[in-house]
């Protein structure tokens, strides 16, 4: 269902062992797939797998209960989740007198515009030694509750609410304590605006919801589906760029995080647990990733019509072959186009085949 082709029903129809390009209808970009290269020798860097934390409370951790943060504020003696305003925010609220609407560009090259916003940090658990993969489904459900509440609250003041997590040193996480972030902004960020345009154009052209239709095809084909439950499915997208990238899609038509009902929130917690245990068990390591949620921007953005959108989660994990061999987006990818060797179908096969429970809980 790219610009020119139907989804492939089999490996051979998806280009077989020959190099081919796949279209990403969400970003409007292509990815080069080179399956014949999966056996090439690796003499590059080996990253030592990070040591996982074993202490329940780390006195030197800024996120543990009762500890002092970098700005000298003290965390409460919390249990479960804890949300606070980022002490080093990338976006700050507008001053009352500040003019926030984008100005007419005064220069065709040196353009800028004001932006305001707010950044928060969510601790997923009081336990320093956990990761989301090792929380119970009930504990993950309380993280989902925070995502829903924060999206709903910040969506009243801002155009965009980005829920995300950088997991692991490989993705630049500053601290092993289980945590994620929420950034809200007065403008719709570039990648999100692009996804919005692509979904809108697809709806205008076909009368159908792009991701809803994509999800239904994937459920029918099964080859790229990693797991599913009564309200969600996870697949390695046909156009994935990272080796084990996945897309998390609701089975119902939901446009935003704060529209999920109780059953869908519970289903989300369950499918996240399922996915994260597969990820960690794949190379028996705490699997690094950047993950985050996209849905229709809030009304402040001038967005009048959500019907082109479908809520979805992106997981972008860098590991390729082992706990220490990662993919780098360099060279051709920085200069020309994303490229992958392992096919999305093979990646989905591998993730589907991983047995549970979590290797550290066996
Ligand atoms: P990352 O691990 O994804 O970098 O997120 C941690 C965030 O926590 C980071 O944005 C904030 C950093 O600014 N932080 C505080 O707000 N206070 C602290 O005392 C430590 C870290
Ligand atoms: Zn901690």
Image: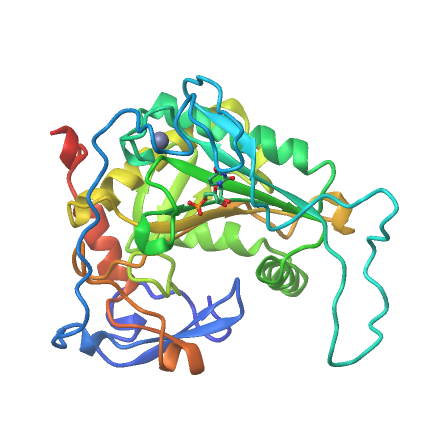
Q: Residue furthest front?
A: 72
Q: Is residue 67 above or below residue 131?
A: above
Q: How many marks?
A: 0
Q: Could you tell me if residue 336 is visible in this image?
A: no
Picture colour scheme: rainbow
Instruction: Give whichever of 1, 179 is nearer the camera.
Output: 179
Instruction: Give whichever of 14, 103 is nearer the camera.
Output: 103
Instruction: Give whichever of 306, 315 is nearer the camera.
Output: 315
208 with respect to 50 (left or right) = right
Instruction: Give whichever of 37, 52 is nearer the camera.
Output: 52
70 with respect to 329 (left or right) = right
Q: Name the residue: 47% across, 24% down.
A: 263
Which image quarter holds the C terminus?
Answer: top left
Q: Is residue 267 above or below residue 254?
A: above
Q: Could you tell me if residue 224 is visible in this image?
A: yes
Residue 72 location in percent, x, y? 52, 32
Q: Name the residue: 19% across, 77% down.
A: 37
Q: Is residue 118 above or below residue 231?
A: below
60 with respect to 146 (left or right) = left
Q: Name the residue: 22% across, 43% down.
A: 280
Q: Name the residue: 32% across, 40% down.
A: 176
Residue 58 location in percent, x, y? 30, 29
Give the image quadrant in which the ligand numbered 2 is located.
Answer: top left
337 with respect to 226 (left or right) = right
Q: Is residue 255 above or below residue 107?
A: above
């Amino acid at each position: 269902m790219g610009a020119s082709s139907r989804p492939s029903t089999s490996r051979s129809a998806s280009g077989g062992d020959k190099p081919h390009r796949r279209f990403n209808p969400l970003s409007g970009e292509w990815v080069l797939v080179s399956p014949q290269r999966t056996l090439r020798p690796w003499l590059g860097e080996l990253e030592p797998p990070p040591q996982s934390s074993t202490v329940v409370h780390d006195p030197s951790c800024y996120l543990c209960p009762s500890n002092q943060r970098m700005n000298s504020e003290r965390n409460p003696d919390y249990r479960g989740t804890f949300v606070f305003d980022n002490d080093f925010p990338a976006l700050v609220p507008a001053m009352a007198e500040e003019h926030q609407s984008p100005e007419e560009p005064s220069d065709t090259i040196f353009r800028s515009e004001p932006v305001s916003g707010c950044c928060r940090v969510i601790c997923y658990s009081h336990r320093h030694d956990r990761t989301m993969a090792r929380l119970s489904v009930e504990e993950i459900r309380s993280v989902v509750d925070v995502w829903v509440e924060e999206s709903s609250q910040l969506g009243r003041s801002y155009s965009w609410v980005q829920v995300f997590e950088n997991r692991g040193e490989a993705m630049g996480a500053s601290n092993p304590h289980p945590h994620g972030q929420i950034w809200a902004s007065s403008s719709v960020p570039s990648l999100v605006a692009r996804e919005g345009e692509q979904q809108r154009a697809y709806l205008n052209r076909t009368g159908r919801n792009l991701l809803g239709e994509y999800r239904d095809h994937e459920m029918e084909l099964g080859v790229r589906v990693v797991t599913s439950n009564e309200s969600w499915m996870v697949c390695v997208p046909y156009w994935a760029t990272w080796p084990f990238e996945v897309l998390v899609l609701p089975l119902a038509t939901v446009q935003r995080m704060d529209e999920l009902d109780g059953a869908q929130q519970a289903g989300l917690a369950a499918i996240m647990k399922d996915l994260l245990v597969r990820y960690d068990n794949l190379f028996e390591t705490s699997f690094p990733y950047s993950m985050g949620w996209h849905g229709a921007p809030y009304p402040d953005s001038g967005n009048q019509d959500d019907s082109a959108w479908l809520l979805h989660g992106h997981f972008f994990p860098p590991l390729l072959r082992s706990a220490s061999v990662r993919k780098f987006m360099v060279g051709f990818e920085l200069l020309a186009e994303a490229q992958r060797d392992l096919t999305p179908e093979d990646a989905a096969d591998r993730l589907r085949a991983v047995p549970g429970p979590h290797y550290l809980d066996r």
